[in-house]
C-alpha cells in the first residue's frame, strides 16, 4: 500500500520521514516511516495503562523536545483516543496526547495487510540510540526477521502486557511484557 511520505522534525541528526495515514481538511495523521528508537513500555513488569506508561511520558517530553523546534511543536495537535485491553477486568480511560502510539484497530485500519506494517529501524537512529542499537542487534537471532518489533498502546492478555507488531507485520496475539525494549513508531496529528 503506497502512502504519501513527508518530512517533519529531526531525530538522531536527520529529518524524520512520516507516512501520511489520513487527511482531514488541513490536518494530517502521521506515523514515522521507520522505528526511531527502542524503549520499555514500563521499566517494571507490572500492570500499567497507556496513560501511566513511561513510553507515553518519553514521547511527550524527551522525544518531542529532541525532534521538533518550537514552531514545529506548535503545529502538533492534541487528540483524544481510546485504548483497548484484552482483559475484561481492566478498562482504560480515554487519553489526550500530542504524540502517541497506534492502537491495534488503527494499525489494522491503516495497514490492512501485515506486509504493510513491517518497519525497519532507521539506520542513523541505530547509531545514535544505544537502546535501539542494542535492540536491533538481537533481531538476527530470530528466524525470518524482516523488520523491528514495535509497540502499540493497547493492553494484552495479561495485565503486564501490551500489543506489539512482530517483524513480519503480524500482531503478537497475547501481547508482550512491558519491561522489554521494543521499537517506537510515533504517531501525531499536524496542521
Image (tube, rainbow, N blue to C red):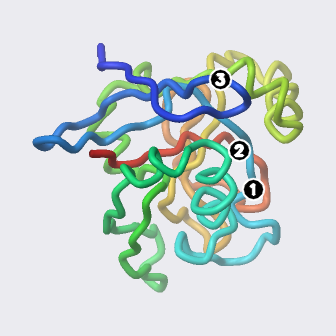
Front residue of this view, candidates 9 and 79: 9
Give the distance between the C-alpha atoms of the residues marked 3 and 2, in whole angstroms: 21 Å
Q: Left or right: 65 with respect to 72?
A: right
Q: Give yes or no for contact between labels 1 and 3 (Cβ–Cβ under 8 Å).
A: no
The residue that disc 2 covers is 182
Residue 154 picture location, percent across and down = 48, 61
Q: Is residue 97 above or below residue 46?
A: above
SS for dot 1: strand
Residue 14 - label: 3
Going 37% across and 38% down the picture, which residue do you hit? 30
The mark closer to the camera, 3 or 2, is 3
| Tally of marks | 3
Using residue 145 as the reference point, say whether residue 17 is left or right of it: left
Whole-percent x, y for residue 37 in the image: 71, 39
The residue that disc 1 covers is 40
| Residue at horizontal 44 percent and vertical 28 percent from the top | 18
- Relative to residue 94, is residue 165 depicted above or below? above
Neighbour tally class for label 1: few under 14, some 14-19, many 20 plus, Cα within 10 Å: many
Going from N to C along the chain, the mark reached first, 2 or 1, is 1
Amino acid at each position: 500500500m503506497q502512502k504519501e511520505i513527508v518530512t517533519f522534525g529531526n531525530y538522531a541528526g536527520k529529518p524524520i520521514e512520516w507516512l501520511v495515514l489520513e487527511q482531514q481538511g488541513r490536518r494530517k495523521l502521521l506515523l514515522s516511516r521507520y522505528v526511531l528508537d527502542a524503549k520499555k513500555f514500563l521499566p517494571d513488569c507490572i500492570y500499567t495503562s497507556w496513560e501511566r506508561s513511561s513510553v507515553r511520558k518519553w514521547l511527550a517530553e524527551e522525544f518531542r523536545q529532541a525532534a521538533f523546534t518550537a514552531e514545529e511543536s506548535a503545529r502538533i495537535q492534541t487528540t483524544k483516543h481510546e485504548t483497548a485491553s484484552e482483559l475484561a477486568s481492566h478498562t482504560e480511560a480515554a487519553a489526550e496526547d500530542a504524540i502517541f502510539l497506534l492502537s491495534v484497530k488503527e494499525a489494522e485500519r491503516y495497514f490492512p495487510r501485515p506486509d504493510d506494517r513491517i518497519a525497519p529501524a532507521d539506520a542513523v537512529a541505530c547509531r545514535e540510540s544505544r537502546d535501539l542499537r542494542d535492540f536491533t542487534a538481537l533481531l538476527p537471532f530470530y528466524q525470518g526477521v524482516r523488520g523491528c518489533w514495535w509497540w502499540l498502546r493497547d493492553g494484552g492478555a495479561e495485565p503486564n502486557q501490551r500489543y506489539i507488531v512482530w517483524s513480519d507485520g503480524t500482531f503478537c496475539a497475547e501481547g508482550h511484557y512491558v519491561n522489554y525494549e521494543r521499537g517506537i513508531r510515533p504517531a501525531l496529528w499536524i496542521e
